[in-house]
């Protein structure tokens, strides 16, 4: 993957892998007795339990008042309200009421209305709806129970988990902290239903958790400003993940090639793009070998441009904001690697990340320069803002020949 929103990149990477996902602990009900700043993040868990909560969110492509009322156990007293709430939604959309707990309904587009270019469960619409319901802030202070129902729920657990995760960012950098009353059981808990019955397959919940943790981690890296995430600090993030995976008993290794060593070893694309930055460019390689027989060897190559000014082919002022996301491809690959290893995927994996900043100083790569790539091919530069193909070319060459 090249760039773009990390969560979407992770979905593309996971298309190569079998269904992935994690079972987290249940919340215990308790009184409001603590405070926390809104600069913290809501916890997210997936489990085959229906918990008493302060807020309920029902999600599906088709929802009935009977199914909602039965789960809320509120009887005929609330049926009219639920039916009115559902009838107020014209096509896909959402509605909210109080019974007295806050109850929201998210109705997704019907399968017949989905084009072949979109996912049949419309995860992007689910993310938009949850953001509109302020899930990220309500999940900090209160217990929120999300119930997702579909006749084919088993097929859609992973994309639903990624969609919910995108609505719960981990990175915050507010200048002031507004404290809120927090319940001991605060957090977001998700359960899945198929054909009216709760899905109880622990492997699906494990996959959902692993992928969710990856999506939120990738989004956190993408949200960090370039003053906080640079090739050095990004490398530290990779080492921390490798260390955690190894401590959990997985056969994971990590190596780095940094700065002038890249030039000496022939990685002209990575070195050339990153040579003008304050932090030296890096090639980070992580490998995983499963305990049993490996079915195949998969390499994930990610573009990690922590900030892209365009180099001497400088971007205009309107084209540069948001270029902190130019490392999104690498974040998606890193998250997929973490999720796959956590789930003990029976495949050997190699993660190859090029971590650079495309900056400007007297050493910057110039148009008309000629560099030699790891493959041995020479490349003439005519646009320093086309740096992605240079660093990914070295990554692919490394993956193909090592």
Image (spheres, helix red, strand yellow):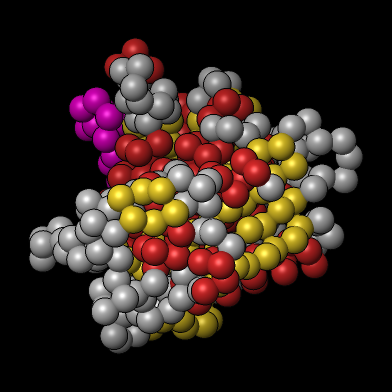
Measured as percent of width and height from the top left, residue 389 is found at 38, 47
Q: Quadrant of residue 262?
A: bottom right
Q: Residue furthest bottom?
A: 176
| In this view, 401 is above or below 334 | above
Measured as percent of width and height from the top left, residue 357 is found at 37, 68
Q: Look at the image and say whether residue 363 sits in the magenta stretch.
A: no
Q: Quadrant of the N terminus?
A: top left
Residue drawn at point x = 17 percent, y = 64 percent: 314
Residue 331 visible in the current orientation: no
Residue drawn at point x = 39 percent, y = 68 percent: 274
Residue 296 visible in the current orientation: yes
Q: Camera-side residue: 222 or 301?
A: 301
| In this view, 21 is above or below 322 | above
Q: Residue furthest right?
A: 292
Q: Residue furthest top?
A: 112
In the displayed structure, does residue 289 sit left or right of residue 366?
Answer: right
Q: Look at the image and say whether residue 87 sits in the magenta stretch.
A: yes
In the displayed structure, does residue 16 sit left or right of residue 55?
Answer: right
Q: Camera-side residue: 103 or 309?
A: 309
Q: Quadrant of residue 201?
A: top right
Magenta-drawn segment: 82-96
In the displayed structure, does residue 397 sit left or right of residue 170?
Answer: right
Residue drawn at point x = 35 percent, y = 38 percent: 124
Measured as percent of width and height from the top left, residue 150 is found at 51, 25
In this rendering, the count of numbered labels is 0
Measured as percent of width and height from the top left, residue 30 is found at 59, 70
Q: Camera-side residue: 290 or 168?
A: 290
Residue drawn at point x = 58 percent, y = 53 percent: 352
Q: Camera-side residue: 108 or 390?
A: 390
| In this view, 256 is above or below 194 | below
């Amino acid at each position: 993957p090249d760039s773009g929103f990390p969560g979407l990149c992770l979905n593309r990477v996971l298309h190569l892998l079998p269904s992935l996902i994690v079972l987290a602990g249940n919340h215990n009900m308790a009184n409001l007795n603590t405070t926390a700043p809104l600069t913290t993040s809501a916890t997210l868990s997936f489990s085959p339990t229906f918990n008493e909560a302060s807020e309920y969110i029902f999600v599906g492509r088709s929802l009935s008042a009977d199914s909602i009322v039965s789960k809320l156990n509120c009887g005929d007293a609330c049926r009219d309200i639920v039916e009115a709430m559902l009838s107020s939604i014209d096509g896909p959309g959402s509605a909210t009421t109080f019974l007295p707990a806050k109850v929201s309904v998210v109705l997704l587009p019907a399968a017949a209305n989905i084009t072949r270019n979109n996912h049949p469960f419309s995860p992007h619409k689910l993310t938009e709806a949850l953001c509109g319901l302020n899930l990220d802030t309500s999940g900090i202070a209160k217990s929120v129970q999300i119930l997702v129902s579909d006749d084919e729920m088993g097929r859609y657990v992973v994309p639903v988990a990624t969609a919910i995760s995108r609505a719960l960012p981990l990175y915050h950098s507010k200048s002031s902290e507004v404290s809120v009353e927090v319940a001991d059981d605060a957090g977001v808990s998700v359960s899945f239903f198929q054909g009216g019955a709760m899905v109880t397959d622990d492997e699906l919940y494990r996959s959902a958790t692993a992928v969710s943790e990856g999506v939120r981690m990738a989004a956190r890296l993408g949200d960090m400003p370039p003053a906080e995430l640079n090739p050095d600090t990004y490398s530290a993030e990779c080492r921390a993940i490798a260390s955690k995976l190894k401590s959990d008993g997985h056969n994971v290794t990590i190596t780095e090639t940094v700065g002038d060593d890249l030039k000496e070893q022939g990685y002209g694309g990575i070195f050339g793009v990153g040579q003008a930055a304050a932090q030296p460019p890096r090639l980070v390689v992580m490998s995983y070998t499963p305990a049993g027989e490996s079915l195949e060897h998969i390499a994930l190559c990610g573009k990690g441009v922590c900030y892209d000014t365009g180099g001497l082919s400088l971007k205009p002022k309107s084209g540069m904001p948001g270029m902190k996301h130019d490392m999104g491809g690498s974040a998606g690959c890193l998250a997929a690697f973490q999720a796959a290893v956590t789930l003990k995927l029976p495949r050997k994996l190699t993660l190859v990340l090029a971590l650079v900043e495309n900056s400007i100083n007297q050493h910057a790569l110039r148009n008309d320069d000629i560099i030699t790539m790891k493959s041995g091919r020479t490349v003439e530069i005519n646009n320093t803002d086309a740096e992605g193909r240079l660093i990914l070319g070295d990554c692919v060459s490394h993956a193909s020949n090592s």
